[in-house]
Image (cartoon, rainbow, N blue to C red):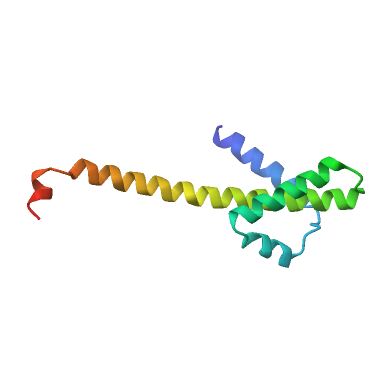
């Protein structure tokens, strides 16, 4: 994507109206503190509620927003774990590269 394309995309995003959220700030803060397993389980329930149908438009939108917030939280936590795993692998690779070298033995 060129700089011009990126600028146009950003301009379009600014032009779109921001919809009112069905979730309160407190609800968002609560979701942001959930452990992965709890976020995942609540996300499953939100999806099941949407798939079951029978909700009015407002309730459906609320379930959708809850699902989006829970999915974001789960992805955030998975990203943190991935970063920690990557760091541990790099550390292990670095230590392995030095293992048995003369400089490692001189310590």
Q: Give the quadrant of the C terminus.
A: bottom left
x and y percentages locating residue 17 in the rendered image:
79, 50
Query: For the point 89% across and 52% down, which residue is it?
Result: 58
Query: For the point 21% across and 41% down, which residue is it?
Result: 97
Residue found at the very far bottom of the displayed protein? 26
x and y percentages locating residue 15 in the rendered image:
75, 46
Instruction: Using the image, determine if residue 30 lies above or below residue 16.
Output: below
Residue found at the very far top of the displayed protein? 1
Q: How many marks?
A: 0
Residue in the foreground of this view, choosing between 39 and 60: 39
Query: For the point 45% across and 48% down, which residue is it?
Result: 83
Q: Quadrant of residue 1?
A: top right
x and y percentages locating residue 78 in the rendered image:
54, 48
Q: Is residue 25 left or right of residue 89?
A: right
Residue in the foreground of this view, choosing between 102 and 19: 102
Query: For the point 81% across and 58% down, which residue is it?
Result: 22
Q: Is residue 68 left or right of residue 5?
A: right
């Amino acid at each position: 994507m060129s700089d011009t394309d990126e600028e146009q995309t950003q301009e379009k995003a600014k032009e779109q109206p921001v919809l009112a959220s069905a979730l309160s700030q407190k609800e968002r803060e609560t979701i942001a503190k959930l452990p992965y397993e709890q976020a995942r389980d609540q996300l499953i329930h939100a999806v099941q509620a949407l798939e079951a149908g029978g909700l009015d438009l407002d309730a459906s939108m609320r379930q959708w927003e809850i699902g989006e917030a829970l999915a974001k939280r789960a992805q955030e936590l998975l990203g943190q774990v991935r970063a920690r795993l990557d760091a541990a692998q790099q550390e292990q690779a670095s230590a392995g590269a030095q293992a048995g070298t003369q400089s490692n033995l001189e310590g």
